Amino acid sequence: MLLRLCLALGLCAALPALAADPVDRPEIEIFMPSPCLACIDWGAYLADNGFRVSYKETADMAAVKKRWRVPAALQSTHTAVVAGYFVEGHAHAEDIQELLRERPKARGITVPGWPRGAPGRELSNPTCETACTTLDNTTGEREVRRDLYETLLVKPDGSTRTWARH
């Protein structure tokens, strides 16, 4: 909770390194509209998984997507940039880490739309409360309901191939 608050307020520089030497942690810049709680949740998830995260609020997300050549049919709310690649939508940290290890010739990866249960789209996201959870009829407990979805690699020519399945 403290990490998410610090990330949201941009005060994380005051916190000690979380998982590794900050120099060793990949830096990812998240461009997002304001306010976007799911975008902040996704950034906190990435920070928890070894990334240095910075947020750039912008009223012109279309310009960001155009600059990074994110195909219209593959867009989501936020666009992140890491090591010269775009990361569109709620991608898993492991998918991004694999992208950085393999360094394919590509524009980036994308999780189009807003799949339920993706990082930043779980129970903690208030905009996802009724769409992403269901009550167990026998116990009354909340249970995460997830969509099956793919992370796509966007090649230089704009075509795609499956990068990961979730």
Image (cartoon, rainbow, N blue to C red):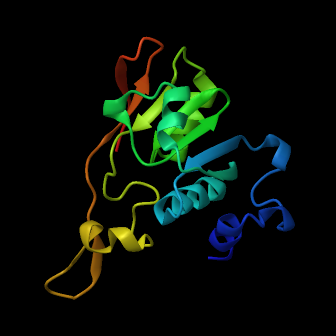
Residue 137 coordinates in the image, percent (x, y): 13, 84
Q: In the picture, residue 17 is in which quadrant?
A: bottom right
Residue 44 coordinates in the image, percent (x, y): 60, 61
Q: Residue furthest front?
A: 59
Q: Residue furthest top?
A: 157
Q: In the picture, residue 26 is in which quadrant?
A: top right
Q: Residue at x 35, y 33 (%)?
A: 74
Q: Is residue 135 found left or right of 61 in the rendered image?
A: left
Seen from the viewer's position, the closer of residues 128 and 144 is 128
Q: Residue at x 29, y 79 (%)?
A: 142
Q: Is residue 29 found left or right of 161 in the rendered image?
A: right
Residue 80 coordinates in the image, percent (x, y): 57, 41
Vertical position of residue 107 compared to residue 61: above or below: above
Q: Residue furthest bottom?
A: 139
Q: Is residue 23 found left or right of 83 in the rendered image?
A: right
Q: Residue at x 52, y 44 (%)?
A: 60
